[in-house]
Image (spheres, helix red, strand yellow):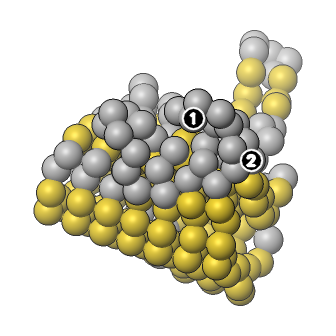
Amino acid sequence: SIALKECRDVTIRDLLLENAPNYNVSLLGCDHVEIRDVSIRNGYADGIDPDCCRFVRIARCRVESRDDAVVLKASLALGVRRSTESVVVTDCDLVNVRNGLKIGTESSGDFKNIVFQNCTLSGRSEIWGPPPFDIRPFPSAGVSIQSVDGGRLEQVVVSNVTMRDVRAPIFVRLGERGWGQPVPRAGVLANITISHLVA
């Protein structure tokens, strides 16, 4: 696993990560990050997690995860509200049990200028228990876009995405879960464009 906190000008490339017991690549409060040509095999948890990060490019990666493949967050892990901005995920091949491309597991901060493009997504079922195996598909989405903790989520572009074996190709939610809020209130979803998607 790779975990970086409050780093600048980071390049992660040409790596193979196998059997990581937690998040495979976790970025918290990092700016100007490039993740390129990284392969993740049999990841137990999320594949690549930019949280409160800005100016991130994830390109030509293959992620096989038992949870979310690529998930953007804006949590309170830094002790303050901080946005996730200017993130591009492009030319990736994602295999997952939960969500392929996700925004907003935690959304106390804002999201702005996010691009998901030219990716392939494949859902898979998880096997539980001894033979005869109990195969349980998780409630998964290809692209999941959520603001549930008061943050603004705006200027998101999803284009040229192909997916198969997902239960919901697109899931968009504005909710009032309210983590980190004295009184739960909804944030904002605005200017979201989804085009050229095949599922």
Q: Nearer the viewer, mark 2 or mark 1?
A: 1
Q: Report which quarter residue 61 is drawn in.
A: bottom left
Element under label 2?
A: loop
Q: Is residue 7 left or right of residue 157?
A: left
Number of residues whose C-alpha sits closer than 10 Å to that of mark 2, classed few (under 14), some (14–19) or many (20 or more): some
Residue 153 x %, y %:
58, 63
Can residue 99 be seen? no
Q: Is residue 83 above or below residue 157?
A: above
Q: Is residue 76 left or right of residue 159?
A: left
The residue sitting at 32% across, 63% down in the picture is: 54
Number of residues whose C-alpha sits closer than 10 Å to that of mark 1, classed few (under 14), some (14–19) or many (20 or more): few
Quadrant where the N terminus is found in the figure: top left
Q: Which mark is residue 74?
A: none
Residue 165 x %, y %:
79, 57
Q: Is residue 74 left or right of residue 179?
A: left
User: As rendered, which of 112 and 81 lies closer to the eye?
Assistant: 81
* Sequence order check, earlier mark of 2 and 1: 2
Quadrant where the C terminus is found in the figure: bottom right
Element under label 1?
A: loop
Per the model, the C-alpha gap separating discs 2 and 1 is: 13 Å
Q: Amino acid at mark 2?
A: Gly
Where is mark 1, residue-wise? 181
Where is mark 2, residue-wise? 175
Identify the residue at the far front of this view.
Answer: 183
